[in-house]
Amino acid sequence: MEHIDLCKIRRGDYVGKKVAVCGWVRTSRDSKNVAFVELNDGSELNHIQVVFEKADFDAHTLDGVLNLGAAISVVGKVENGLKAESVEIRAEKVELLGASDPSYPLQKKRHTMEYLRTIPHLRVRTNTFNAVFRVRSELSYAIHKFFHDNGYYYVHSPIITGSDCEGAGEVFKVTTVGFDKTVKSEDEYNAKDFFGRPAGLTVSGQLEGEVMATALGKIYTFGPTFRAENSNTPRHAAEFWQIEPEVAFADINDIIGIATDMIKSIIGHVMDNCRPELEFFDARFENGLIAKLQNVVDSEFARVDYTDAIEILKKSGKTFVYPVEWGLDLQTEHERYLTDEYFKKPVFVVNYPRKIKSFYMKKNPDGKTVAATDLLVPGVGEIIGCSERENDYDKLLAEIKARGMKLSDYENYLDLRKYGSVPHSGFGLGLERIMMYITGMSNIRDTIEFPRTKDELR
Ligand code: 4AD
Ligand code: MG
């Protein structure tokens, strides 16, 4: 069907010209002689008003055309609208492409986010989710662009894996074997299974990313990762997208610099390309959002040693649910104090205790801490987990053994330390976490099309 995107009409020189457009009816008004439809085709946040002079149409032509949610095509002339710089279309022909039943759940009122989550197939037709997913698309493009422009290769790590990168026991099982009374042991069960061994959905593409980086130099992954997080929080999803660059010959300070550049670059890109969406979020969801983002682009990120962060928390005078002492895995409440109240901007917390972090992180000379950092941001908490990797064969082997991990699952990974091992570092950025930060959405479920969380799969 030949037609033009609505966004082009507003931006181009169309006044006085005849156009064909398609879209869905967002709102409508009907009076004796004239009817109005606010039409949206997804090409931009704004709607275009279509005016129907009833005298121009036969008796039943407009039947169903004014129903909320109806899909229509219109041929008409573009005219200047009443509001400055606005245009509208004066309809000459209209066709009802898809009628919308009056039970359409998105009526002309502001629905709660909770209600909208119950209709994931329709919520994208609201202004809010239309804007969220337009930003998500543009942000994804910005991420690819940043890495592409800086000489990184985009690699694809497997979704099905046989190892648990984070060792947190949150791996979803992948199996084709159902309940079977005759099976006597776990080994027997595994032997019967598709791969003849336990398999799961990846929690991170890092281990394979390291393989690729030790040949291609600079790589990144960008794909879905899965965690059976048993917690029901506003910032954890069971399926989320992660961007994981891995860089050969980079130490912890190099990778912190890369992460900083990337965050500034991608936020700057979204600010340049999604202005109407950000203005919408600023007005409806987080006052001051645009100023906050501008500040991220313009100013230095803070950096604090984990040990100093613990002192800051101790001196805060706050009563935390989880008491503060060295060795503590920072909880949301601690992260929020550090970012929202103390630093008031993004902060890298560096050199975490070895015991609370993953096996692959490089041990610092003090023996107690690792060269790892999390980037925490106000309002959200951790958006990046980052580290220099242990590149010494013996130290890595000792760590794998000490943690009781199954050595045979990590032999290839250890080989990287046997053949041309180099210092290397990487990080994981949670796409939905940075979406929360950029859009002001306070719940991760509202940043991904089809959220998967504990007991929720629609
Ligand atoms: O800190 P994490 O666990 O780090 C890793 O997975 C490393 N392998 C990354 C690397 O070095 N290549 O996770 C990285 C990021 C977190 O900072 C957070 O933004 C996001 O992934 N994330 C989640 N996002 C949504 N829901 C969850 N359940 C998440 N778990 C982690
Ligand atoms: Mg982490």
Image (spheres, rainbow, N blue to C red):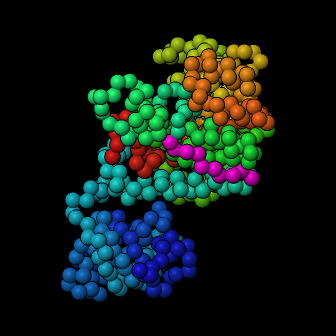
Residue plotted at (72% across, 55% down): 149
Residue plotted at (32% across, 81% down): 94
Q: Is residue 96 magenta?
A: no
Task: Give the answer, above or below, for where 39 lies relative to 1.
Answer: above
Task: Give the answer, above or below, for where 390 lies relative to 297.
Answer: above
Q: Quadrant of residue 292?
A: top right
Q: From the viewer's perspective, tell me whether residue 226 is left or right of residue 74.
A: right
In depth, the one of 238 and 2 nearer the eye is 238
x%, y% of residue 384?
61, 36
In depth, the one of 188 and 227 nearer the eye is 188
Instruction: Inspect this view and state whether residue 339 appears.
Output: no
Quarter of the figure with the N terminus:
bottom left
Instruction: Inspect this view and state whether residue 95 appears.
Output: yes
Q: Is residue 153 magenta?
A: yes
Residue plotted at (68% across, 39% down): 210
**The magenta stretch spans which residues?**
151-160
In depth, the one of 340 and 349 nearer the eye is 349
x%, y% of residue 56?
29, 87
Q: Quadrant of residue 445?
A: top left
x%, y% of residue 32?
23, 77
x%, y% of residue 306?
66, 21
Residue plotted at (31% across, 64% down): 69
Count of marks overlaid on the render: 0
User: What is the chief secondary structure element of the magenta stretch?
Assistant: loop
Task: Give the answer, above or below, for where 349 lies relative to 25.
Answer: above
